[in-house]
Image (tube, rainbow, N blue to C red):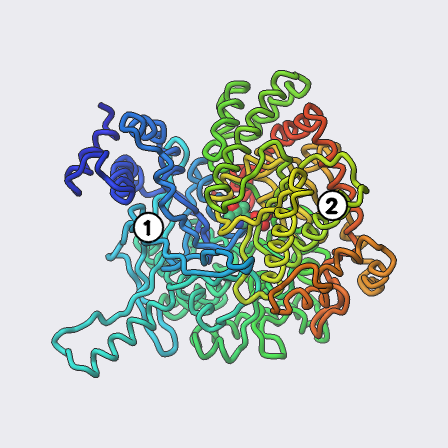
Amino acid sequence: MNTFKSDVIELLELEYGKTIQQANTVELYHAITKAAMKPVKAKWDVPAAGKKACYFSAEFLTGRLIYSNLMNLGLLNTLSELFNENNIDIRALEEVEDAALGNGGLGRLAACFLDSAATKGIPLNGYGIRYHYGLFKQYFENGFQKETADDWLRFGDPWSLRREDEKVTVQFKNQTVYAVPYDMPVIGYGAQMVNTLRLWQAEPINAFNFRLFNDQKFELAVRERNEAEAISSVLYPNDSTAKGKKLRLKQQYFFTSASLQDMIRSYKKKYGNNFSHFPDEYAVQLNDTHPVVSVPEFIRLLVTNERVSFPKALKLARQTFAYTNHTIMAEALEKWDVNLFRSVIPNVYRYVVMIDRALVKELVSLGVPEEQQEQYRIIAENKQIHMARLAVFATHSVNGVAKIHTEILKNSTLKEWYALYPERFNNKTNGITQRRWLALSNRELSGFITEKIGSAWLTDLSKLKNLEKYKDDAEVIRQFAEIKQIKKRQLAEYIEKQEGIKLNPDFVFDVQVKRMHEYKRQLLNAFSILDIYYGIKEGRIPDFHPTVFLFGGKAAPGYLRAKGIIKFINEIAGKINNDPAINEKMKVVFVSNYNVSYAEKIMPAADISEQISTAGTEASGTGNMKLMLNGAVTLGTYDGANIEIVQQAGEENNYIFGARVEELGKMEESYDPKKIYQREERVRRVVDSLVNGELDDGGTNLFKELYDSLLMGASWHKPDVYFLLYDFLPYCDAKLQAIQDYADRFGFTRKCFLNTANAGVFSSDRTIQEYAAEIWNV
Ligand SMILES: *Cc1c(COP(=O)(O)O)cnc(C)c1O
């Protein structure tokens, strides 16, 4: 028998005294993982020669690892066989929790990058935090979002290896803790290479010491343990603003200091105390501003522990670090209050001051007049430390994540910096791994593609272009449509099980799945659904092709407007789904607890991909790429990577609408949503549904608050900052057009097919190779 199969069976016998049929899911999970780890370990222990890249990220949204790791090891089919032989459903392992150590796109990007690097033979190790609780779990009660803790370690963590011998200490002002590394193997496709995701766990220095056991000592020990463990206990369920500020800063310092100590320790084994070669040994990519505190920490470690001079250390930092910007939302460009920063890490603060001084010196030497210097200052007059400024100044590379986003950085968000260091700015359009987002999640489509063009696309997605020759082949297009139908049936089955709502797979599946945020405009989508509902009832929209409107996404627990939007959508769903007159035409579902595993089921089943953020607000998006790859048309704005998507797949194969960045920029001051509201009856009708009693927010006032945000504004913003009313009618037109076009099954499927065929550049393999060649030089 195959060794993997016999290993699994043997392990079950040895560890649990059970046969494969007797074993429960947890036991199967552990035995399978342990058996799979055997071939991994041999590859894993080989240290990479030459320069290594390190990806510092507060988030790694890896999702469930077992299927993807087995696939990359070439063992997934073997496991399927083994399960089949024993009448076990391979879906049993779906009970295993996702590793949801991230909020959304930024964390998922980090996970896709690791997969791509290991597959492409690029030595890239991830560094982050081993949160005890990942992103909260979401469920609905009366249509309101409720949250529970995500106890992802419930079944154990067999993919991780605790490396007790490599722990380091991290010091805060009034606290010292251990950072203990847990290493996960990052297995490249075909298992050519195994990189490492090293996640640090915070633990107390003083273990319980039984010699000193008395009540008082016990209390102290408990307190120390709790305070230490707090640092790595929860992922902040917020991808923009920094709440729980102090603990968040501690988390950022904790994992970056530990990672740097780890790298410096390895470096010294090779080069001793000569640090000149550090940038030849390591490149560090900072995933947004969360890990930027590592720059002054790196300098501090070299100056105080290694006797490197400050100017030399700053120079090494600049050569080593590179920064990725992920957003232009002002509230997400992190700033730390000086007093808070000093109360947590005063020793690091000193180096921030020195870097700020070096900045002023450089500004003077570059001829920036004094009155213009304040806009650059890392420590601003108002006693705030600007992490993005620190990142731009003290690194050699600043990149945006889609072409339009990088242009906005250069021309607007960071324009004064671009004027100083134009050579530092570059673009790296995001990508996704086709192994997870096609091979694993859509085995039907991937089998079909391989049958048509061979399997090279698995490691070279540009090969998809070879599908294009079939675009007018009616039989191929028919098969493509049939696969979509299968995926829609599977999703419908799953949703019925999970949400208790029955869906008809003959409906159009219109999908918006992503974190809840005003700029992503789920509320605009909701309004359009109401408008269609009224339109059908009034007869304004005859011949409407039946459509399911599917939502998924979590709102940060403190983000009341986002929670109000969820409730609003659920109210609309209730109204429409319970209206027998309309039931045969429309269904609305907000799926609960959208996460990576849910996404893997939704992406392959979508016909229409809703990417409707206000132009200029979504840095890139990656959900748009997953949907494109699986053959959905994009209904979207000229924003983020949508622009590149339609450049690749053709505007005629997608549905682009709405104001562009330039238009919105010109309008800033003059925009008056009230005028549109008064002029357009359809706009008025949907907006009024927030307040006229038609839909009920259970007395929370959340709907009135949304209404006001559109028409009155608030102390901190003008009305309708995200231009929902401005884009409303063009959006409805584009949406109705897409749904109407669906009726032409060949024509519509051909569009879908061409999206898949042109998705090649959106592989994270391409992105990571650009980082390696153009930023890291590895
Ligand atoms: C891809 C992904 C995202 C990012 O989606 P966007 O539409 O780009 O915001 C968020 N969450 C999960 C679970 C994902 O898989």
Earlier sequence position, callout 2 versus callout 1: 1
- Horizontal side, residue 531 vs residue 384: left or right: right
Question: What residue appears at the point 21 percent right and 37 percent down from the top-left corner?
Answer: 22
Residue 236 position (above or below residue 497): below
Q: Residue furthest left?
A: 211
Q: For the N terminus, give its image quadrant.
A: top left
Within the image, what quadrant is residue 96 found in? Answer: top left
Expressed as whole percent of the image width and height from the top left, the position of residue 658 reads: 77, 48
- What distance separates the C-alpha of mark 2 from that of mark 1? 51 Å
Give the residue type that dot 1 points to: Asp
Please determine whether, in this image, residue 261 is positioned above or below residue 630.
Answer: below
Image spot of residue 505 (x, y percent): 58, 33
Image point (45%, 58%), residue name:
136
Disc 1 crowd rating (10 Å Cα; few below 14, some 14-19, many 20+) is: many
Tell me the element at label 1. strand
Q: Which residue is mark 1?
A: 183
Q: Of tags 2 and 1, which is closer to the observer?
A: 2
Q: Residue furthest bottom?
A: 216
Name the amino acid, label 2: Ile
Q: Is residue 578 left or right of residue 280?
A: right
- Tag of residue 141: none
User: As rendered, which of 61 and 413 lies closer to the eye?
Assistant: 61
Res. 390 in view: yes
Image coordinates for residue 109, horizontal then vertical, percent:
51, 47
Q: Measured from the top left, where is residue 249 in percent x and y?
A: 46, 69
Residue 174 to residue 294: above or below:
below
Residue 651 seen from this side: no
Helix, strand or loop for disc 2: helix
Ligand 1 has an atom within 8 Å of the beta carbon of the residue at disc 1? no
Mark 2 lies on residue: 532
